[in-house]
Image (cartoon, rainbow, N blue to C red):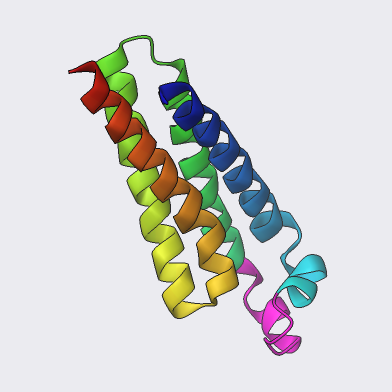
Amino acid sequence: MKKIALILVVLIAALHLYIAWFEIFAWTSRGPKVFDTFPAELFEKTVHMAANQGIYNAFLAVGLVWSLLIKDEKWQFNIAVCFLIFVAAAGFMAAVTVAMKAGLPQLVPASIALALLMLSKLKRQ
């Protein structure tokens, strides 16, 4: 169970690296295609805001990768849980304030990984 949770952590980190790239470097080129319900002129006006959001997504990815590099099981668990909660919160807010399709790809995997980590910890006790 823990192994599956850690694989999800890797995938979630990769997703957030992609989101960071998208928001920092591809906001005006790919943004209008991905968020097709938003007015096209919005993207050029919000390029700096999107880049700022991209930095936060990069921080989430780095935190998740960091958790995988920690040897101490207790601290690996603590740091992974912390950053997964951050990802789930970001996904929830995106689902509520932007679009469901923007938030669910963050919220659902993070919630599943959190549940699996918690269950694996309970099994060891």
- Relative placement, left or right, of 114 versus 123 is right
Furthest residue in direction front, as rendered: 123
The answer to which image quadrant residue 49 occupies is bottom right
Magenta part of the chain: 35-49
Question: How many circles with numbers are drawn on the protein?
Answer: 0
Q: Residue 50, how many percent across, how many down?
A: 59, 66
Task: Residue at 36% x, 41% y: name it.
Answer: 114
- In front: 94, or 117? 117
Q: Is residue 109 magenta?
A: no
The answer to whether residue 61 is above or below residue 103 is above
Query: In the rendered image of this protein, does residue 80 appear above or below residue 49?
Result: above
Q: Of all residues shown, which one is farthest toward the top?
A: 71
Q: Write down the quadrant of residue 44 in the picture.
A: bottom right
Give the position of the N terminus as an image quadrant.
top left
Query: From this viewpoint, is residue 49 visible?
Result: no
* Residue at the (47%, 55%) spot, across then down: 108
Seen in the picture, residue 93 relative to 38 is either above or below; the reply is above
Where is residue 87 shown, x and y percent of the image? 42, 50
Which residue is drawn at the image coordinates 52% and 36% (left, top)? 8
Check the image and report above or below for 43 versus 81: below
Q: Quadrant of the C terminus?
A: top left
* Relative to 104, 33 lies left or right: right
Question: Magenta segment: does it hold 40?
Answer: yes
Does the image show residue 116?
Answer: yes
